[in-house]
């Protein structure tokens, strides 16, 4: 009688770990394939071989020597960095007001934020492009993509608001009794306590800006000097359509910062995403 529970537990352990290993291989093997192809020679990359005969690391140097590639890196860092910074600076105060202030129209404002999340960007792309191109003359640069983020992001506001609801109001009231104004309460109390949620939103926004293809295609297509990595990679792929080793090397260089940032901030990211759904 005692052996059955033990054998059942062993079978469950095997089933769970087999599933976990299969899922890990499912997500890992494409990256392994990209990496192995990136260090192959030109001839072997076009063959059916899966393992490189000689590890050709010069492919990465060749990618960096591609005209404009370093500019694409700089533009992507500028777009992702400023976009993330502007989004946090504009979204945190709005989320704080929606979470902790009691005012007339609060529910309506929250409904408008949620409704904005449902609006596809393609719906307003034509009038927005006309404004940026014909009236502000900023087409061909990254500013039409970066400046709107200084006015808040609906998805970021929603996530931050959900996280701020988990912060006890007693801490805020104690700070106000000590003479802190709302700005100091936000900066000294709310922001330190909301670091996991802010980190999660920052990562979401950084990943969005880094991988954004639609925006740079609309606003920077006519100016190669303003291309980002996501858009420039398409041009690189077209120029090296048969050089799969170089294409894979460039792809890996584009993915590397995102993977690195995620692993460095994985704990804060998971904690922030988990806690945003604690309270509605």
Image (cartoon, rainbow, N blue to C red):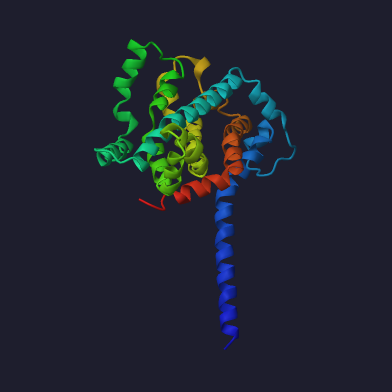
- At 42% from the left and 25% from the top, the residue drawn is 150
Q: In the picture shown, does residue 49 fall above or below 138? A: below
Which of 220 and 77 lies nearest the eye of the viewer?
77
Q: Is residue 167 visible?
A: no
Left or right: where 157 falls relative to 10: left
Asked which quadrant contains residue 262, the reply is top right
Left or right: where 129 falls relative to 198: left
* Residue 109, image x, y percentages: 28, 37
Which of 215 and 250 lies nearest the eye of the viewer?
215
Q: Across the whole image, how many numbered discs are drawn on residues?
A: 0
Q: In the picture shown, does residue 196 fall above or below 70? A: below
Which of 54 and 160 lies nearest the eye of the viewer?
160
* Residue 217, image x, y percentages: 43, 23
Q: Is residue 110 visible?
A: yes
Asked which quadrant contains residue 139, the reply is top left
Report the residue that reaches farthest toward the bottom: 1
Report the residue that reaches farthest toward the front: 178
Locate the N terminus by quadrant. Answer: bottom right
Left or right: where 38 falls relative to 124: right
- At 30% from the left and 26% from the top, the residue drawn is 124
Which of 197 and 64 lies nearest the eye of the viewer?
197
* Residue 224, image x, y percentages: 51, 16
Left or right: where 133 falls relative to 107: right
- At 68% from the left and 29% from the top, the residue drawn is 59
Report the residue that reaches farthest toward the right: 54
Q: In the picture shown, does residue 170 fall above or below 151? A: below
């Amino acid at each position: 009688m005692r052996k059955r529970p033990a054998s059942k537990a062993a079978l469950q352990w095997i089933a769970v770990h087999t599933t976990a290993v299969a899922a890990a291989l499912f997500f890992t093997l494409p990256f392994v394939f990209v990496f192995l192809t990136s260090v192959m020679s030109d001839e072997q990359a076009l063959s059916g071989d899966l393992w490189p005969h000689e590890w050709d690391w010069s492919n990465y140097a060749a990618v960096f020597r591609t005209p404009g590639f370093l500019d694409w890196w700089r533009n992507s860092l500028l777009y992702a960095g400023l976009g993330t910074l502007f989004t946090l600076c504009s979204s945190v105060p709005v989320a704080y007001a929606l979470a902790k202030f009691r005012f007339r129209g609060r529910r309506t404002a929250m409904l408008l934020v949620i409704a904005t999340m449902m609006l596809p960007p393609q719906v307003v792309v034509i009038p927005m492009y006309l404004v940026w191109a014909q009236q502000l003359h900023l087409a061909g640069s990254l500013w039409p993509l970066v400046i709107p983020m200084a006015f808040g992001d609906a998805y970021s506001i929603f996530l931050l608001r959900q996280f701020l609801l988990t912060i006890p109001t007693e801490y805020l009231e104690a700070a106000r009794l000590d003479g802190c104004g709302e700005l100091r309460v936000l900066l000294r109390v709310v922001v330190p306590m909301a670091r996991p949620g802010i980190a999660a939103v920052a990562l979401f926004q950084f990943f969005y800006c880094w991988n954004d293809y639609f925006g740079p295609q609309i606003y920077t297509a006519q100016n190669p000097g303003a291309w980002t990595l996501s858009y420039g990679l398409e041009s690189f792929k077209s120029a090296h359509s048969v050089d799969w080793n170089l294409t894979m090397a460039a792809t890996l260089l584009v993915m590397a910062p995102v993977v690195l940032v995620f692993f460095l901030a994985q704990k804060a990211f998971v904690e922030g995403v988990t806690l945003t759904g604690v309270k509605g």
